[in-house]
Amino acid sequence: MQFKAMVLSNVELSPGYFRMKMTAPQELASSAPGQFLMLKVNDAIDPLLRRPFGLFDVGSFLPEYAGCGAQIYCEILYKVVGKGTKLLSALHHGDLVDLLAPLGKGFDLGPAGEEKVLVGGGVGLAPLYYLAKELKNRGEKVRLFAGGRNRDDILCITEFERLGVETYVATDDGTLGERGFVTQVLEPHLAPGTRIFACGPTPMLNAVAKMAQKSGVPCQVSMEAYMACGVGACLGCVMKGANHTEETPDYRCVCKDGPVFDSFELQWS
Amino acid sequence: MQFKAMVLSNVELSPGYFRMKMTAPQELASSAPGQFLMLKVNDAIDPLLRRPFGLFDVGSFLPEYAGCGAQIYCEILYKVVGKGTKLLSALHHGDLVDLLAPLGKGFDLGPAGEEKVLVGGGVGLAPLYYLAKELKNRGEKVRLFAGGRNRDDILCITEFERLGVETYVATDDGTLGERGFVTQVLEPHLAPGTRIFACGPTPMLNAVAKMAQKSGVPCQVSMEAYMACGVGACLGCVMKGANHTEETPDYRCVCKDGPVFDSFELQWS
Amino acid sequence: MQRPDMSVAIAGIEMRNPVMTASGTFGYGAEFADYLNLESIGAMITKGLSLKPKAGNPTPRIVETSGGMLNAIGLQNVGIDAFIEQKLPYLKNVNTPVIANLYGNTLEEYGEVASRLDGLAGVAGIEVNISCPNVKQGGIVFGTDPSAAQEVVSLVKKNTSKPLIVKLSPNVTDVVVMAKACADAGADALSLINTLTGMAIDLERRRPVLANVTGGLSGPAIKPVALRMVWQVAKAVSLPIIGIGGIMTGRDALEFMLAGATAVQVGTASFLDPSAAQRIAREMEEYLVEHDIASVRSLVGALEV
Amino acid sequence: MQRPDMSVAIAGIEMRNPVMTASGTFGYGAEFADYLNLESIGAMITKGLSLKPKAGNPTPRIVETSGGMLNAIGLQNVGIDAFIEQKLPYLKNVNTPVIANLYGNTLEEYGEVASRLDGLAGVAGIEVNISCPNVKQGGIVFGTDPSAAQEVVSLVKKNTSKPLIVKLSPNVTDVVVMAKACADAGADALSLINTLTGMAIDLERRRPVLANVTGGLSGPAIKPVALRMVWQVAKAVSLPIIGIGGIMTGRDALEFMLAGATAVQVGTASFLDPSAAQRIAREMEEYLVEHDIASVRSLVGALEV
Ligand SMILES: Cc1cc2nc3c(=O)[nH]c(=O)nc-3n(C[C@H](O)[C@H](O)[C@H](O)COP(=O)(O)OP(=O)(O)OC[C@H]3O[C@@H](n4cnc5c(N)ncnc54)[C@H](O)[C@@H]3O)c2cc1C
Ligand SMILES: Cc1cc2nc3c(=O)[nH]c(=O)nc-3n(C[C@H](O)[C@H](O)[C@H](O)COP(=O)(O)OP(=O)(O)OC[C@H]3O[C@@H](n4cnc5c(N)ncnc54)[C@H](O)[C@@H]3O)c2cc1C
Ligand SMILES: Cc1cc2nc3c(=O)[nH]c(=O)nc-3n(C[C@H](O)[C@H](O)[C@H](O)COP(=O)(O)O)c2cc1C
Ligand SMILES: Cc1cc2nc3c(=O)[nH]c(=O)nc-3n(C[C@H](O)[C@H](O)[C@H](O)COP(=O)(O)O)c2cc1C
Ligand code: FES
Ligand code: FES
């Protein structure tokens, strides 16, 4: 659906990373972790297109107005990388933004009793928090593996821990957690009975998908692509399906068929 | 010159009319009434071009910082008519804007001892305040004739009176001052020894210019034109000079040869 | 005051208002059903359809530019048969005319696709996209060569009894020459403009942003070019014209009508605001009410020059 | 690290950096002297000069559009003689190459203006604007017809010993055909693009905004079209190319160089920011420093496709 959301807060968590909370309509309460929103940062034509962000959290809160019932909020976690996110980072409490949400296909949480393994690279942590919350609500065992270049890229670990998630951290420079790739930390933990949910840079997802395949562990990945419409209409955001060839092409829309895919659905390089 | 100015205040005076005060460099202290500035309302490409505004006032103020000496400010008075002025009206204390100022040719104040007659239509009052201040500083006798559609269009009359200017008001609907055109109120006051300074909608300036010619009173008009560069380079803002014909064209740049012209320099319809 | 009469007709296609959705920007209609009332707009135009399903180009396929966007989707579509089987049944239930946009990689394909659509219930008309390279003739674009365009249009005309709209490319020296060629060949209406060919470069990677290197520029950036071409063609050709290019608001749409368009298409705007087509139709109606204009048709070509 | 080498040469015109100011957007140079150091830019191009002084069009002459602007100045200029008498002496004192942009209303006028400039000290080269209607041939635009363009260029070439830059119009089906025609006729360099023809409408008045009805679109909106054309021409023609169209930043300029331009011109940007040309040159240099690139010339045509 399309709606105007009021910014409730917009806080810089670590250099260049922001967490923004916005009001949302009741319908958003039935969104699924892994779904995303498309946000128009202003009414102008610059930037022209909406920007996609994963749902970091959805929940309800009690506004500080007398007699006001519980309201729904949604949150995003974003990194300032260009024009749109720079403008976004300047928004304040009370500003209005136009949203399309919830969009796309979220994570399949899988059967109860499995060990749920969340793997996030940098701002790829964003959709995993909402996921972790839902999984913990169901009483599942959840581990989070978070990676980044340095400690500034590792976000909201305390929040995950507060949910009861066991967390593992790796950074390229060793400034937080183990030094190295998060996939190295992850590998020993993969075993039958685990299920992977991953989001982050494509090379990381590539490595995780291969690792999962080797270990025979089901793995879902949340992908990114340059998007215009977000609703499956422009065909701008497609990725190659596993069996894609030049002759028998098989493209999937990240916005509609994804952003979450089973890793074996896609073609990895 | 080009400089960044900080907005000091931006106040709605009457519905749709704003007065904005900005910091300015020392050089602006030697600007002349009738000169204008070109303002870029934001860093974006929408709106693309700068917007021109007359200097409503230039002066010095003492900032509320310990040990800080007197600073120069400049003010504009503007009407919200489109995209640029709408964005402008949303600026707050502390926001920065990029300015070119002072631009163009200001009013020739004329010899001492004349009666200075200021004629303003609507937001055309803007450059006349700075002019009145300068004239009063020289101890001149100054009368202001202000016209508009209704009383909301009549701005800052008290400020003019505080300078010691004698004011006359006319509105189309009679909600303030006399009912009718300001030119009707003006006519009986024109006599040898007066000098007219007019700014406002073109039909008004047209009427004033003709009246001045009839009465043999010198008359300067401040014109408006759609501008791109403001410095005489694009040739977008030209007006027809008095002797302009298709065969012997004579165009004047409003931004550089004006915005203030002797009325006989221009071609009136 | 009575509500203004917003209805227009293009070559016999009756529409409740002049706002159509542009090919390639509105999917097959269903994608937008959550965001607007499909029965509030004038007509829907499908994604460009070809004889066989088409995979389209590698990614990246889109990139934002100043006031516009480039796309190089590569005409990905399900193909004419899958369209008829899978997409058309849904659209038949929507009480809004559906116009099939079609293209071919060769002259013959144009004829073939047109004939498959002929006589098909639920398709009110066809719009032929001639901005495609002719595979057989070494890639020369049908829409930039008057005689190639004429051939395409004549062939399609032979293969259809439906109203035939021809969509013109702006990437030509003289759009009027192209318009006349298409009119002479039997077009019932003209729509313009398709996208301007452009390019974006990724400075850091020293590569074109789009995998296809070049793409089509759309959005508000191209509106002045589109308005100019609509005006030129409307003066020179007596066919009804559909104006396209950077329309974001009801005011934009009405400007195109003044320039000579009987209807308009909304493209990129639907990405920014999925309810754009409905909103634009409403804004147009509001303008008519405010200005006491009884019929939107009275504005067509009403520009005083 | 040493400062990067920013110098380039176009057909023998040596410039301290690749940033030139575009014709018609920088007056005769002096207008901008308060806002930037005229000796910090690569070269200055004059307003388009004609044989006789030209009055230009009635007003309004300019209007803003989304991400761009339309102008219909109508080539108002002081004429070649007044330029030489009144404007050139000032420019001679500035240590930056001055390139005279010229045009004619007839073929003969082009030749005449060129010959008056020939041998004139203080003019480093000439840029011929062929986007003008040929008054004698019923208004057909020289720059959209390869043989007319060829005629103009050949004639100018005969009348000048100065480096000859030909400025191409983007309002053509195939800019490469035009580029080749000009190259064959003796151009020493090509500059592109001039403005795209567009139109704006005042809905309330039901009239075109510009008195001239149509005008030339410039600014960031046209950058994708300009980049595409520069890239196409650079691939096809071996002459040095000057990229123009919507350049606002050093990054924009460097993108044009990757596409194949040896130098760039800054137009509309100077209206937004009168110091744009100097700033853009500085931003380019900063990019080179950050990326450890020794010479800006190494970027010319370095796009990997
Ligand atoms: C489904 C999905 C979920 C996402 N979730 C998050 C999230 O939770 N947090 C977060 O920080 N980022 C997320 N992103 C990425 C985010 O959309 C981009 O960082 C953002 O759009 C950049 O906008 P910009 O204007 O700041 O950058 P620009 O100046 O436009 O470009 C900077 C870089 O961002 C890339 N980019 C720009 N626009 C898009 C777009 N529409 N889609 C994808 N990439 C783009 C460009 O390729 C470029 O490399 C998500 C992307 C997708 C597709
Ligand atoms: C020398 C000069 C001094 C001026 N002084 C004042 C002043 O003191 N106070 C004030 O309120 N206004 C003044 N104006 C007019 C002011 O510049 C316009 O109202 C303003 O630019 C409108 O911008 P916009 O984006 O809100 O309107 P737009 O949405 O761009 O257009 C709305 C209307 O404003 C006109 N307009 C837009 N841009 C310009 C432009 N660059 N130059 C002239 N007209 C334009 C358009 O023709 C249109 O009718 C002055 C104009 C000039 C030339
Ligand atoms: C993503 C995208 C896909 C498009 N696909 C087609 C197409 O398949 N067939 C066609 O005729 N035009 C296609 N177009 C062109 C549009 O229909 C329209 O002519 C153009 O975008 C200009 O209108 P706008 O500025 O309102 O977007 C496409 C445009 C976009 C942006
Ligand atoms: C106001 C204005 C006047 C121009 N006058 C001329 C001219 O006299 N001769 C010419 O060859 N180009 C002229 N141009 C075109 C510019 O030189 C340049 O090619 C075009 O504006 C595109 O560059 P930009 O997007 O950086 O402005 C003019 C452009 C503008 C905006
Ligand atoms: S973003 Fe348009 S189809 Fe996915
Ligand atoms: S605004 Fe450019 S010459 Fe006056």
Image (cartoon, coloured by chain):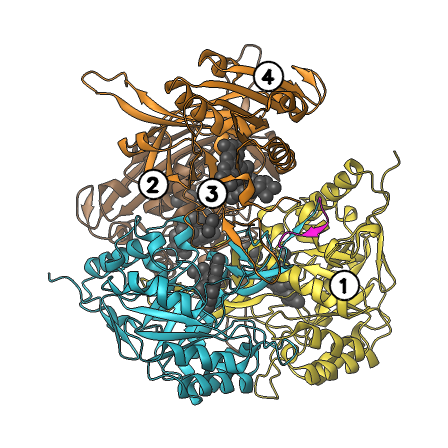
Chain colours: A orange, B brown, C cyan, D yellow
Disc 3 crowd, CA 10 A, few/some/many (<14, 14-19, 20+): many
> What span is in magenta?
C204-210
Q: Residue at x 29, y 64 (%)?
A: C89
Are dots 4 and 2 on a single chain? no
Q: Majority secondary structure of the magenta segment? A: loop
The answer, for residue B203, to whether it is visible in the render is no
Residue A30 in view: yes
Q: Residues within 10 Å of mark 1 (few under 14, many from 20)?
A: many
Residue B33 lies, in percent from the top left, at 49, 41
Percent across and percent down for residue B189 are 29, 49
Secondary element at image label 4: strand
Q: Amino acid at mark 1?
A: Ile
Tag shown at residue D241: 1
Residue kind at label 4, given as amino acid type: Tyr
Which mark is first along the chain, 3 or 4?
4
Pick the residue in front: D96 or A213: A213
Name the chain letter of the residue that bears numbered label 3: A
